[in-house]
Image (cartoon, rainbow, N blue to C red):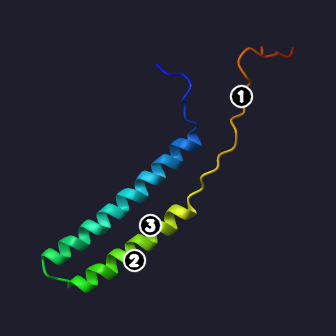
Amino acid sequence: MNTKNFKTEQEKQHQDKLRSIILQHCVQCHQQLDLLQLRLVNFDDLITGVQNTISMTTKQLSDLPTDFPAPTFEPAGTPTKLKKV
């Protein structure tokens, strides 16, 4: 078990949001391909839809925060000093 790669709650939330954005992108592109197969849209509309999907995904990814504050824990080897109450 590797004990050096624990993730903070913020990192877990960031990873979940990233997966959500990627899944949303894939679903939208798949839906547009389904519409093309059913001949409900023509190829030019498909290209426009995919371009809009890519630009929306790019905007969502750029709006996603990537910096996290450093965790507030004591370094190993430093004993915790308890205060008398």
Is there a contact, CB below 8 Å, between mark 2 and mark 1? no
Front position in the image: 78 or 85: 78
Mark 3 residue element? helix
Mark 1 residue element? loop
Question: In the picture shown, does residue 42 fall above or below 4?
Answer: below
- The residue identified by callout 2 is 52
Residue 67 point in image, percent of width and height:
64, 50
Instruction: Name the residue at 45% across, 71% down.
Output: 56
Q: Which mark is residue 2?
A: none
Mark 3 or 1: in front is 3
Question: In the picture shown, does residue 73 fall above or below 19?
Answer: above
Mark closest to the chain's N terminus, 2 or 1: 2
- The residue identified by callout 3 is 57
Mark closest to the chain's N terminus, 3 or 2: 2
- How far apart marks 2 and 1 lie (CA) works out to 44 Å
Question: In the picture shown, does residue 18 fall above or below 35?
Answer: above
Residue type indicated by callout 3 = Thr
Instruction: Name the residue at 49% across, 22% down.
Output: 2
Left or right of 27, for residue 9? right
Residue type indicated by callout 2 = Asn
Is there a contact, CB below 8 Å, between mark 3 and mark 2? no
Mark 2 residue element? helix
Quarter of image, res 51: bottom left
Quarter of image, res 72: top right
- The residue identified by callout 1 is 73
Residue type indicated by callout 1 = Phe
Badge 3 crowding class, 10 Å Cα cut-off, few under 14, some 14 to 19, many 20 or more, is some
Residue 27 point in image, percent of width and height:
30, 63
- How far apart marks 3 and 2 lie (CA) works out to 9 Å
In which quadrant of the rendered image does the C terminus lie? top right
Left or right of 66, for residue 36? left
